[in-house]
Amino acid sequence: MKKLSVEIKPADEDGAWAEAVQGVKKLPEVAPKPAAPLIIDEITPGINYQKVYSGERLQPLKVGETANIDRRTAEKFKRGEWPIQRRLDLHGLTEKSAYDEVENFITGAYRQGLRCVLIITGKGYQRESDDWYETRGVLREQVPHWLNNPVMRPLVLAFSYALPADGGEGALYVLLRRARE
């Protein structure tokens, strides 16, 4: 077999590169443009709680309690006749992320002027050691407490378990106050 021999010459042996770049001038360096100043819009408070509720101290609400609304509205609310304007499903969320979702959901619904919303908590789970009739749902127990905290309580008139078609005891109807301007 014959050996191939390839002669490799250095690239600039013939002066080809020098000839190719002859007469080329370096471009002047361009200074980078200064960054545009950061403009931050003025932060406006989301909800003016003085306009929402200016009465006496609010009492904590219990599930199904409608003492602070008129009889006709209360009956309509308990029968589930208010149209549900928005739903929030908390299935699969941790307690912390569910709290953030509920707070954002309630304040957002209030700002948009919604009156009746549905929060689906789920019914919880049963362990083998638990009593047959007892289920434990962390979110189901916590959401009523969250609706009574100082951020959400002024926005909420009442809340009640939903009808079976909407989730039964695994969901809550929440009646919000009218947004006042």
Image (cartoon, rainbow, N blue to C red):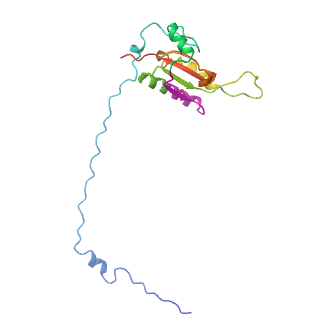
Of residue 37 and residue 154, the one placed in the foreground of this image is 154
Residue 97 in percent (x, y) is at 55, 31
The number of numbered badges drawn on the structure is 0
Can residue 105 be spotted in the picture? yes
Locate the N terminus by quadrant.
Answer: bottom right
Locate the C terminus by quadrant.
Answer: top left
| In the displayed structure image, the side of residue 33 where residue 178 appears, left or right | right
Q: Is residue 166 magenta?
A: no
Tell me which segment is drawn in magenta. 83-103
> Which residue corresponds to the image point at 77% horizontal and 29% vertical from the top-left?
128
Of residue 64 and residue 36, the one placed in the foreground of this image is 64
Q: Is residue 92 magenta?
A: yes
> Which residue corresponds to the image point at 74% horizontal and 21% vertical from the top-left?
133
Identify the residue at the far bottom of this view.
Answer: 2
Residue 12 in percent (x, y) is at 34, 80
> Which residue corresponds to the image point at 77% horizontal and 26% vertical from the top-left?
129
| In the displayed structure image, the side of residue 105 where residue 29 appears, left or right | left
12 is higher (above) or lower (below) than 45: below
Q: Quadrant of residue 61?
A: top right
